[in-house]
Image (cartoon, rainbow, N blue to C red):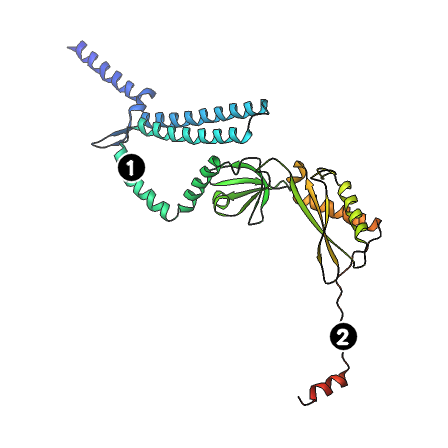
Amino acid sequence: MRAHQTTSALTVLASAGMGDAPGGWFGTRLIHTDEFDLSLGAVIAACLLFLGCLVVSAVLRYLLRRYARKHENVNQSAVYTVGRLMHYLLLTLGVLLALNATGIPMARFTVFAGALGVGLGFGLQAIFNNFVCGLILLFDRSLKVGDFVELASGVHGVVRDIHIRATRVTTNDDLDILVPNSEFVNGRVVNWTVREGLRRLKVPFHVAYGSDKEQVKEAALDAARAVPHTYALEGPHAPQVWLAEFGDWALKFQLVVWLNADATRRPGSAKAAYNWALHSALQAHGIRIPLPQYDVRMRDPQIATATDNSPH
């Protein structure tokens, strides 16, 4: 009898010890309903599955970037697009796997989907709009990473990243600007490098009336030859000098040049270089750059009074 009591006590203590072991914590119920049970182990498994998808996404994107760096002939924008889409797909897969691990029935998300729809109609509408616009930018080939763009808001620079909410644009001053994706889809965008080719630049300048037009042309062509941004000096892309307009106080010319690929991404710097060269060339040829002049005629006060008082 005494031995039986001792054995029962040891069994109870062993059972209590197993319940307190770290492995028993995974079975701890966090939520218990008639339809499903949510345990601590299920939550940990869901988190591990989601983190695993994130790690796989990071590794695959790193391998894609490494492959693109080793093979320069690969389309960099295509590699970036594949990496972003793969990241979104793995995130979606991670969420689905995490929900499946917790055992939460999908019918429970009908209420959540309704609340999400109401949220999209109000506060989340702008975020959802930017997300959809970001997907459009990834699939649309009119804008890609590495393009030099100019927006209607005045922002111009190189597209570096296309994220869920915004696109990162790096200016020539090395400033990173986050532009909402919807601005690229709904607004006017000038893509200077949508086609890898040449771009024509028109640089206006004025000279005084009475200047020799042929001398002005020669000075402007000398300026074009002095700037390294000029693509070609002969042939169909050679610089040209246009007499654009007869102004009120000056002859208005335009130096028309074709820029090389490097200068296409820096239109402001290229125009400044041509203005500098034009000023130096005009000074070297002795051509005067006029200032606005207006003639003011003063009437005799007595004549003006007599004219105003005369009967009509």
For residue 160, what is the image quadrant?
top right
The image position of residue 231, as x and y in percent, is 70, 37
Residue at far bottom of view:
311
Q: Residue at x 52, y 25 (%)?
A: 64
Q: Residue at x 29, y 24 (%)?
A: 27
The image position of residue 109, as x and y in percent, is 29, 37
Marks 2 and 1: in contact by CB < 8 Å? no
Residue 280 in view: no
For residue 247, what is the image quadrant?
bottom right
Task: Give the amino acid at mark 2.
Answer: Arg
- In the image, 48 versus 295, the foreground residue is 295
The image position of residue 140, as x and y in percent, is 48, 37
- Residue 297's mark? 2
- In the image, 144 versus 166, the foreground residue is 144
Q: Residues within 10 Å of mark 2 (few under 14, many from 20)?
A: few
Q: Residue at x 55, y 29 (%)?
A: 76
Residue at far front of view:
236
- Residue 248's mark? none
Element under disc 1: helix
- In the image, 96 versus 251, the foreground residue is 251
Residue 95 in view: yes
Which numbered mark, 1 or 2, is in the foreground of this view?
2
Task: Give the amino acid at mark 1.
Answer: Phe
In three-dimensional space, the C-alpha distance between marks 1 and 2, rounded to whole angstroms, equals: 83 Å
Taking the image as shown, residue 236 lies to the left or right of residue 14, namely: right
Residue under label 1, please give it. Answer: 109
- In the image, 39 versus 78, the foreground residue is 78
The image position of residue 113, as x and y in percent, is 31, 40
Position of residue 62 relative to residue 310, above or below, is above
Position of residue 168 relative to residue 26, above or below, is below
